[in-house]
Image (cartoon, grey):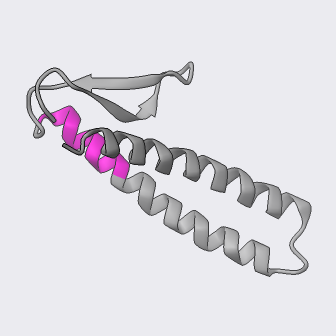
């Protein structure tokens, strides 16, 4: 990330607004925290995908299970898209 560019962080404010980081170094403590958070969000998304597929493959899965799986899948998709946007903006 070059000096002066803002990095979209993988979390939002309590109001749901985006958070940005302005740092001179790609190795700052907050940058490393953001990198770790992105990795954790993507790992969690993979686990949610496995669970959602299992629920969808179960012909007797009830409405509660399907709604829970869909809710978690939407949350994970939102996080993954935020990571993709953030990383895409940092491509030179």
- Residue 27 coordinates in the image, percent (x, y): 10, 40
Would you place residue 87 above or below residue 50 in this image?
above
- In the rendered structure, which segment of residues is drawn in magenta? 28-38
Q: Which quadrant of the figure has residue 73? A: bottom right
- Residue 7 coordinates in the image, percent (x, y): 28, 31
Q: In this view, does 20 lie to the left or right of 47?
A: left
Question: Residue shown at 49%/47% (left/top)?
Answer: 81
- Outermost residue on the front side: it is 92
Is residue 29 in the magenta section? yes
- Residue 66 coordinates in the image, percent (x, y): 81, 62
Question: Residue shown at 82%/80% (left/top)?
Answer: 58
Question: Residue shown at 55%/24% (left/top)?
Answer: 16
Viewport quadrant of the C terminus: top left
Is residue 30 in the magenta section? yes
Would you place residue 66 above or below residue 50 in this image?
above
Q: Is residue 3 left or right of residue 35?
A: left
Would you place residue 22 above or below residue 27 in this image?
above
Question: Residue shown at 20%/42% (left/top)?
Answer: 32
- Residue 65 coordinates in the image, percent (x, y): 81, 63
Q: Which of 49 and 8 is in front in this view?
A: 8
Q: Is the magenta stretch mostly helix, strand or loop?
A: helix
Q: Nearer the viewer, residue 21 or 14?
A: 21
Would you place residue 85 above or below residue 50 in this image?
above
Number of marks in picture: 0
Q: Which quadrant of the figure has residue 11? A: top left
Q: Which quadrant of the figure has residue 28? A: top left
Viewport quadrant of the N terminus: top left
């Amino acid at each position: 990330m070059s000096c002066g560019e803002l990095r979209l962080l993988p979390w939002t404010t309590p109001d749901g607004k985006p958070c940005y980081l302005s740092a001179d170094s790609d190795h700052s403590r907050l940058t490393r925290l953001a990198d770790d958070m992105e990795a954790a969000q993507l790992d969690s998304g993979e686990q949610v995908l496995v669970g959602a597929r299992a629920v969808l493959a179960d012909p007797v899965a009830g409405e509660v299970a399907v709604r829970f799986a869909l809710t978690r899948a939407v949350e994970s998709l939102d996080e993954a898209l935020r990571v993709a946007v953030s990383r895409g903006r940092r491509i030179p």
